[in-house]
Image (cartoon, rainbow, N blue to C red):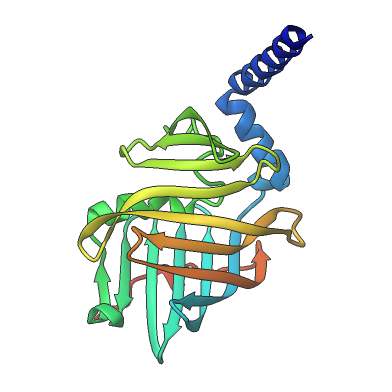
Amino acid sequence: MKMVKSCLALILTLAVCSGIRAQTADEIINKYFDAIGGKDKIAELKSFHSENTVDVMGNEGPSSVTILNDKGYRLESEFSGKKIIQVITDKGGWAVNPMMGSTTPQVIPDEMYKQSRDQIDMGGPLYNYAAKGNKVELQGTEAGAYKLKVTSPDSVETTIYIDSATHFMTKVSRSATVMGQSVEVSSTFSDYKKTDFGVLFPFTVEISYGGQFSLTSKANKIEINQEVDPKIFEMPKS
């Protein structure tokens, strides 16, 4: 009887492992898009705007993110009366960061731009990834999530985790340049909610900068496909 039970346990284990191996990257990606509203809805995304509260090591401040699909991304945050602005467009990027001694708009370095450029893509790196020139590799599972490695045409590597039960995206990790140093930046997503548009977005994002410091952003409001003035992405003249 013990031998029979052992054989059954082995068969079940092999079946589970076989099921995991049978999952292809494309199948996992399709389940992810189905979970958040479907590819048809993603294709209809034109703009995104969120009003957020950001907590940086116990200090809270207001923040907003505005995206015009494939055209521009603008992040504004305010702490201690100082406004931080980061803008990425299809042509380049600029920033104002008084915390780093920059009170006037400065063009961001090319390497930083390459690492940030996909923020203007509302579908994300997995949506129509082959047409964008992205390569996706399934690297197995980790902590209950499928691990996908995405390599952009610019050789920027991003690791994306898709929960094996909910098929929500739970984490994105990549190397980025912060204060002149290359660090691993990880964004963890939670509290998914359906918007009036019908697509689910994570309302809580925790970002860790190489373990040096972290922040938590919580969305108070998300608006989809509202009118966006492209001029907000233009770099002001000094």
Q: Position of residue 132 (x, y in %)?
A: 45, 36
Quadrant showing the N terminus: top right
Q: Residue at x 49, y 31 (%)?
A: 131
Residue 71 shows up from this direction? yes
Q: Quadrant of the C terminus?
A: bottom left
Please give left or right for residue 110 compared with residue 21 in the image.
left
From this viewpoint, which residue is outermost toward the right? Answer: 1
User: 15 or 124, which lies in front?
Assistant: 15
Which residue in the rendered view is the most extreme toward the front? 2
In this view of the protein, which residue sits in the foreground, 196 or 7?
A: 7
Left or right side of 114 for 226: right
Q: Is residue 223 above or below residue 154?
A: below
Q: Which one is nearer the viewer's eye here, 181 or 213?
A: 213
Figure quadrant of residue 212: bottom left
Q: Is residue 110 above or below residue 160?
A: below
Asked if 29 appears above or below 186 in the picture, the reply is above
Residue 39 in sight here: no
Kindly identify the residue that appears in the image at 56 percent across and 68 percent down.
228
Q: Percent from the top left, x then y, of residue 116?
A: 37, 54
Residue that sits furthest to the left in the current view: 180
Q: Is residue 17 left or right of residue 7?
A: left
> Percent from the top left, x then y, of residue 205?
55, 62
Q: Is residue 78 left or right of residue 46?
A: left
In this rendering, the count of numbered labels is 0
Q: Position of residue 32 (x, y in %)?
A: 65, 39
